[in-house]
Amino acid sequence: MDERGIVPRRTPWGIVWRALLAAAIGGVLWLIGLGVLDYWSLSRPEQIWYLTADPAIGALAIAGVLCFSRRAPVLVGIAASAIVLLGSVAAMGAALLALGSVATRQRSWEIAIVAACDLVAFRWTGLLVYPTENPSLPWWESTLIFGLGFAIVIATGISIGQRRELVAGLRERAAAAEREQAARALATRVGERNRIARDLHDVVAHRVSLVAMQSSALELRPDLPEEERTAALGAIGENARLALDELRGMLGVLRDPAAVAASADAIPDEPGIADVAALVDESRAAGMHVELISAVEGEPPPAAAQTAYRVIRESLTNALKHATGASVTVSIAGEAGEGLAVRVRNGPRANTVAPRLPGSGTGLAGLRERVVRAGGRFEAGVDGDGYAVSAWLPWAT
């Protein structure tokens, strides 16, 4: 491989046709040499050399060019020229094959070096090895003929090289397109898995956290009156059933392609701002101290309302897990043209006896992504001795 592209590997047929072409050219030039050199005027040793050694050397030169031209094309071209210069007319076919191989690389200085060596070798072979007293053509005419032949070989080689570059470029673009398509498909699958994980977390985490907290409360209060114990068990069962119902609904959405597409923004049956009061009541029933402050004027867009509900639900779930017994304040305010603002703040953990519930660590990250995707802003962090989650969502007029 060089900076101009990848040279394809030679096929058996490619080797055969190159060898046959070089042999044919060398053979034609060898036959022409019989007439030009006036074979019968040569000495006996010269005749034997021309009829036997010259074709054999030409065949060996062709084999050498085919074997080594890709490793060192310029050196092979110069070597083929030297063989011609030393007395093998049949090796001219090998020299032209080497020149064409160099031309496919499309490097001007390489082509110029090999072409100059060939021109000297072709022009002076007859004069040095097979001198004639009365050449049939003037030196400038023979030089012009050789130059035209070299030009044809060079043009053919450059054309082959350009075609190789074109094919290599098309293959590379096709491979790049396949890699890009595979990367997009992988990113889509990963994004879909992450979205499904967030949806499942949002649907199940709150209910399961309530069940876990109420179960822990029963374990820590063995002296709880029977009436309160029965109520707590009923709440546990109810939350478990609701969690299963919500999970079934989520799975049904995932099975429906149209619902999956819609779930990226807003699902018709998803709870919104109107359901926040019921969510707060459920949290209070689980033993949380929650204050709700609502100042919403009008009906916010479904996407904003549902996202706000998810922010509140996840924040209450986190407070239940990590700040057991803390007081929680849920604030909602907004109107058309001003946006919808949500803030959930919990104080420090008050119940140090109840165990901390484990978290997945993805809830807040999922909320941030949802809010940002809806065109809003999201903040979460330590607020004094507690923790606060704030979100703002657009509400057009």
Image (cartoon, rainbow, N blue to C red):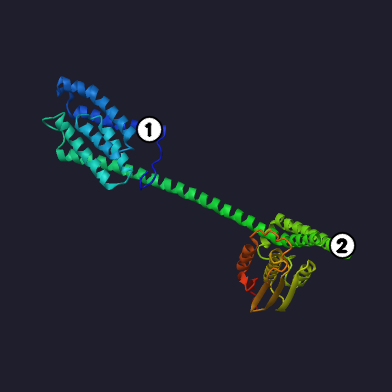
Residue 153 percent coordinates (x, y): 29, 40
In the rendered view, tell whether residue 293 sits above or below residue 33.
Answer: below
170 and 126: which is toward the camera: 170
Residue corresponding to mark 2: 230
First in sequence: mark 1 vs mark 2: 1
Residue 15 has which mark?
Answer: 1
Question: Which residue shows up at 16% across the image and 29% down it?
Answer: 129
Which quarter of the picture shows residue 287?
A: bottom right
Residue at (21, 34) in percent of width and height: 82
Q: Please give the name of the residue rendered at 16% of the width and 28% of the height, measured from the top-left corner.
A: 130
> How crowded is the residue under tag 2: few (<14 C-alpha within 10 Å), some, or many (20+)?
few
Depth order, front residue of 38/25: 25
Q: Is residue 195 visible in this depiction of the protein?
A: yes
Q: In this view, does 116 lie above or below 184?
A: above
Task: Where is residue 355? Give x, y as percent.
Answer: 72, 60
Q: Quadrant of the C terminus?
A: bottom right
Mark sitting on residue 332:
none
In the figure, residue 247 lies in which quadrant?
Answer: bottom right
Total marks shown come to: 2
Q: In which quarter of the image is the N terminus?
A: top left
Q: Identity of the amino acid at label 2? A: Thr
Instruction: Give the x, y percent position of residue 388.
Output: 65, 71
- The residue at the point 21 percent across, 24 percent down is 50
User: What SS does tag 2 mark?
Assistant: helix
- Residue at far right of view: 227
- The amino acid type of the residue labelled 1 equals Ile
Q: Do the residues labelled 1 and 2 touch (CB within 8 Å)?
A: no
Viewer-proximal residue among 377 and 349: 349
For marks 1 and 2, give the one nearer the viewer: 2
